Amino acid sequence: MKKGSKSIPHPNISQVKIIENKNNFPISWLNKQGFCEYGIYLENVKGIEVKPTRAMVKGTTEHATLEANFREGAEPATFEEMLETSQSAEILSRELPVLSAHYGIRGFIDEVWMTPDEFVIIDDKPGTVPYYSSINQVYGYCLAFKDMVDDGRKIIGALRQRGTDNVYWSAYFDDAAEKNTINLINRVHELLLGNIEFIPTKNPNKCRRCRFNNLCDKKMDF
Ligand code: SF4
């Protein structure tokens, strides 16, 4: 994002901002998109409000605890200082904000390991199943990070079981991953522009677990 660029809330779609004349959405939506696009429509376009699930509340609490523990022993530094230091030493950052006006995405990375050779972008998740929707999300962070840094160091995306050291999935953010991620992000932008329709899942198990299922006109019988 260029210095002085304004961020304006989208007039009709919640959580979307307009930055440098382009819609900008939260990277966590790539996870939601993989679960069911129609849920994004219900929540953010139609404006349906439902309570967060118990798992969501638990995740938020665990997240806050980890963050507080980290901050106790952390030394504050700017992003530029961290990049500089990591040229010669390994450092770790938590809750790192990333924003790409070019791709129209933004978010907070749970944890980044910065080493002289590579960056490891970690997203904490409940459980240990590497769902493709979770992989899409962590690759979204990798893309935004790369757009901000791109100093030749390799980038690895990783999923870690929340509250543990168990990294249960990791892979290099290579050219193929980057291309797929850009295609997916472009699809979400097309949805937001109204050029294509939000597709509901055909998986009744997802509808059974969905917090919108009482109000959804497209839910599958379960
Ligand atoms: S109830 Fe099913 S179709 Fe509707 S938003 Fe939820 S997952 Fe999607």
Image (cartoon, rainbow, N blue to C red):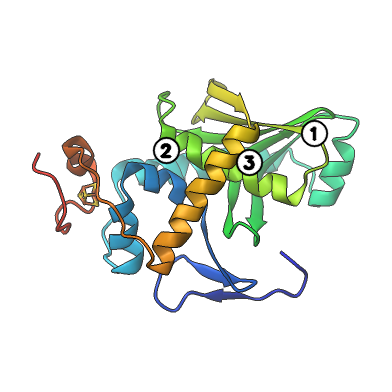
Q: CA distance from mark 2 to mark 1?
A: 25 Å
Task: Look at 39% across and 76% down and name the residue there.
Answer: 12
Helix or strand or loop: what does disc 2 sit on?
A: helix
Quick one: quadrant of the N terminus?
bottom right
Q: Residue furthest bottom?
A: 11
Helix or strand or loop: what does disc 1 sit on?
A: loop
How many numbered discs sit on the rendered protein? 3
- Which circle marks residue 142 in the picture? 3
Q: Classify mark 2: residues with Cα within 10 Å, few (<14), some (14-19) or many (20+).
A: some
Task: Look at 37% across and 67% down and name the residue there.
Answer: 194
> 80 or 73: which is nearer to us?
80
Q: Point out the tag, 3 or 2, that comes first from the N-terminus.
A: 2
**Image quarter for residue 139?**
top right
- Which circle marks residue 133 in the picture? 2
Residue 129 in view (yes/no): yes
Residue carrying label 1: 153
Q: Point out the tag, 2 or 1, that comes first from the N-terminus.
A: 2
Q: Position of residue 80 (x, y in %)?
A: 84, 50
Q: CA distance from mark 3 to mark 2?
A: 14 Å
Helix or strand or loop: what does disc 3 sit on?
A: helix
